[in-house]
Image (cartoon, rainbow, N blue to C red):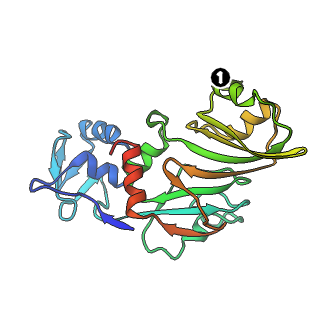
Amino acid sequence: MSTTTGQQDEQGVRLQKVLADAGIGSRRACEQIISAGRVKVNGRVVSWFGERVDPRRDEIQVDGRKIETWHELRYYMLNKPVGVESTMAEGRGTRTLIDYVEDLTERIYHVGRLDTDTEGLILLTNDGELAHRLMHPSFGVTKTYLADVPGPIPRDLGRRLRAGVDLEDGIVKVDDFKLVEQTGRRALVEVTLHEGRKHIVRRLLAKAGFPVRKLARTNFGPIALGRLKPGGVRALTEKEVAALYKAVGL
């Protein structure tokens, strides 16, 4: 699926939106950059972030560097396999996300990351403003994980996780918890939370007494991995993109 930046009225697009769409930062961060006099439009310093521009024709610079402001917006999902690093860098001696999107002609970025030993849903886009909001905890976008842990699972585990578990870097509370399957000493549990701290699901369950053996992210906000196989990539539908925009108030 693709669309174009700058759904413009006759007066153009607000400068901070154009910069955010180009991946410079959040709209608020871009407003601060503009206010600091770091942005030029067609060679002229602009310090008022209400300025409107035409991203197709105007040349915009930040700190003297020309910004590419007109591009097709792209939105994809990838089912990241275990063993793949969540980076678009090349030449690291291991498989990275770039190995799965190298056929794409446009430059895209991953929205957040997954541990190397965690598989599942990663969103990829060049929509800077959407990516920022999806990753920022203040917007409360949840992620859902399926974890393989030792069983049996006590009835009060969900209540304990919702009440909060004290980790070394602070208390974490899950938004939802569900026992999916339990057979003998093996259980599958579903954990939903909007935390973004490193290894948060593994640390949370380990502290609760249930170390994770396998972990997969199945949902990112309103987007579900579905039947996409490990290593598979597909474009999001217009309906899915609209759902992401709604989830972050765009």
Residue beneath the point at 21% across and 64% down? 56
In the image, residue 196 sits, relative to residue 183, either above or below, namely: above
Give the x, y percent position of residue 139: 44, 37
Name the image quarter holding the C terminus. top left
Amino acid type for the residue under numbered disc 1:
Ala
In the image, residue 206 sits, relative to residue 130, either above or below, namely: above
Residue beneath the point at 65% across and 22% down? 163
Name the image quarter holding the N terminus. bottom left
Which residue is identified by label 1?
A: 163
Q: Secondary structure at mark 1?
A: helix
Residue beneath the point at 18% across and 60% down? 58
In the image, residue 236 sits, relative to residue 29, either above or below, namely: below
Q: Is residue 100 left or right of residue 184?
A: left
Q: Nearer the viewer, residue 200 or 61?
A: 200
Give the x, y percent position of residue 21: 33, 53
For disc 1, the neighbor class at 10 Å (few under 14, some 14 to 19, many from 20) is few
Q: Count all numbered tags in the image, as a single digit.
A: 1
Give the x, y percent position of residue 92: 67, 63
In the image, residue 105 sits, relative to residue 218, either above or below, namely: below
Q: Nearer the viewer, residue 72 or 55?
A: 72
Q: Is residue 198 left or right of residue 184?
A: left
Give the x, y percent position of residue 37: 24, 40
* Rendering quarter of residue 237: bottom left
Q: Residue furthest left?
A: 10
Residue 241 visible: yes
Q: Nearer the viewer, residue 19 or 136?
A: 136
Q: Nearer the viewer, residue 211 or 11?
A: 211
